[in-house]
Image (cartoon, helix red, strand yellow):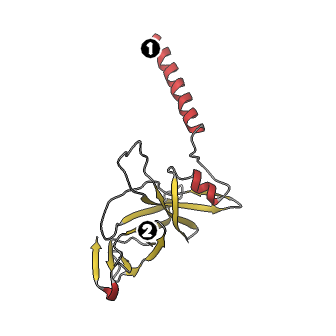
Amino acid sequence: MNYKRLLVIGVVLLVIFGVYKVYNSDYEFGKFDSFDEALEKGIPYSVDTVVYTEKVNGVTIVMYLIEPDKKELPFADYHALAVAFFEGNDDEGWENVGPNGWTHYENKNFTLYHENLYQHDNQGNKLRRIDVTYGEVNDADVVKVEVKDKSEEHYVEARIITSNNGRYYFSVSNGDSVRALGRNGHLIDQQG
């Protein structure tokens, strides 16, 4: 009898603690009144800089930089690049509808990251799939980045974005193969 009472008290305390943590955190679930609020509260990381946004099939894709948490990664001296997917507008509200995460690795020429948004209805039917290939361009000699899905025959040029924080590329595609080209089209690096 005593063990059951302790178990019930422990579960109740755990639930109270969980509600307290969610209530007092900056991260919010649901819809946000403005796009800026969605960026601030709808992404579970502190967004340092928005690098690029693009609207595709009713979804606003945001490529952004974060500074890794020094408590978790005390020796991280870099900004990590990530993307988020939002639906909505300022009249009806904004909602983060995609996965949230980031990865970082070093490469002297360019980095290659993929993120995908898959949306299904309640019956499991696919509503939408958006594939994004993106990364950092680290080599100053790179003037063009091209991506190619394995089912495609030809490469397609990715958008290169230049900001105060560096150079990046972005493509709405499943870039299984990505190549960086220099002047006159010479190949500098290829991944995938």
Camera sees residue 159: yes
User: How many labels sit on residues?
Assistant: 2
Camera-nearest residue between 21 and 30? 21
Q: Is residue 69 left or right of residue 16?
A: left
x%, y% of residue 80?
41, 57
Mark 1 is on which residue type? Answer: Tyr
Q: Is residue 163 left or right of residue 153?
A: right
Tell me the CA gap for discs 1 and 2: 59 Å
Q: Is residue 135 left or right of residue 108?
A: right
Camera sees residue 1: no
Camera-nearest residue between 3 and 167? 167
Q: Name the secondary structure under disc 2.
A: strand
Question: Which residue: 48% across, 57% down?
Answer: 124
x%, y% of residue 40?
58, 53
x%, y% of residue 151?
34, 76
Quadrant in the picture for residue 141: bottom left
Question: Which residue: 36% across, 81% down?
Answer: 155
Asked if 145 appears above or below 107 in the picture, the reply is below
Question: Which residue: 44% across, 63% down?
Answer: 116
Asked if 186 appears above or below 150 in the picture, the reply is below
Question: Which residue: 51% across, 49% down?
Answer: 44
Mark 2 is on which residue type? Answer: Gly
Specify the label residue 100 is tagged with. none
Q: Residues within 10 Å of mark 2 (few under 14, many from 20)?
A: few
Instruction: Name the residue that disc number 2 marks.
Output: 166
Q: Residues within 10 Å of mark 1 (few under 14, many from 20)?
A: few
Instruction: Name the residue that disc number 1 marks.
Output: 3
x%, y% of residue 98?
50, 57
Closer to the N terminus: mark 1 or mark 2? 1
**Residue furthest to the bottom:** 184
